[in-house]
Amino acid sequence: MGVRRAVGQRLEGTIGKQRTDRLRRAERTVRRRLSPPPPPKRPSLTDLAKVHKTDKWGLHRYTPHYEERLKHLRDKEFTLLEIGIGGFKKERSGGKSLRMWRDYFPRATIVGLDIIDKSYVASERIEVYTGSQTDPELLQRIADEHPDLKVVVDDGSHVPEHVRTTFAVLFPLLPPGGIYAIEDTQTSYWPDWGGQVDPKARGTSMDLVKDLVDGLNYEEFLLEGYEPTYTDRTVRAVHCWHNLVIIEKGQNAEGSNRDRVHDRPYRV
Ligand SMILES: C[S@@+](CC[C@H](N)C(=O)[O-])C[C@H]1O[C@@H](n2cnc3c(N)ncnc32)[C@H](O)[C@@H]1O
């Protein structure tokens, strides 16, 4: 091949490649312009806590844990009940966390219960009840009026005795898949709040939680004739973080290898 022909071929190749590159770039631009824009990023629960200024993020670090356990419900229709509406320091304030939940769950009904009348917090998709978290009839009425109740958040008095009473009434009213949260469990260790200095003392909120954790393994107990309790059978998981506990409702019956490993004499 002559030198001129070889140079000519190489030149043609280069020009061809430049044309193809230009064409590809143009195609990409057209495709980008024609395709719909990506959906806007949805705010996280922590973003919304900041917007509504609830201390579930900041003073506390609850929102990432809540989001981890609740994100599967984001677009579902259900009722979330929060005990404790807040705003006791300033007249006609409160409802910060209720507004956070409302914006995170666009199809949910958000119900707040407070011992102080906070009815002015009620707005679209936010309902308010006035009364005590220790009033079983009121709790039952709220559940009756919201048959799709699925999530309970106890951020009320934080008095362990109250926390236990509320749990005893409301947990059985949740369906399988229901979620029950208890905030500020540090009061378990504070006598001024009805707790006890001994971390292992009976009767506190954390004592209730520790019993639930044992109950997760009730099928392994060697106690002869042990009758499983309601929560043994219906608590599926207990998630504990600093001052926050989230309990998942669901069947707890995975079976055990207890009888293959232990002979009867081991039973007590
Ligand atoms: C920590 S504030 C709630 C804050 C709110 N959940 C938030 O995150 O923005 C506690 C609230 O519980 C209410 N409370 C105290 N004792 C109660 C009781 N026995 N029953 C219902 N609410 C109670 C108080 O009036 C107060 O508004």
Image: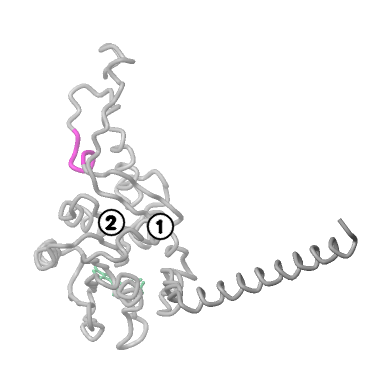
Asked if residue 224 is positioned above or below residue 116 in the image, the reply reads: above
Q: Secondary structure at mark 2?
A: strand
183 or 79, nearer to the observer:
79
Q: Which residue is mark 2?
A: 180
Residue flagged by tag 2: what amino acid is it? Tyr
Name the residue carrying label 1: 68
Which image quarter has ligand 1? bottom left
Closest to the camera, between mark 2 and mark 1, is 1
Magenta stretch: give its range.
Answer: 228-233
Q: Is residue 265 magenta?
A: no
Q: Secondary structure at mark 1?
A: helix
Q: Quadrant of the C terminus?
A: top left
Quadrant showing the N terminus: bottom right
Mark 2 to mark 1 CA distance (whole Å): 14 Å
* Rendered view: 57 above or below 161: below
Q: Is mark 2 within 8 Å of ligand 1?
A: no
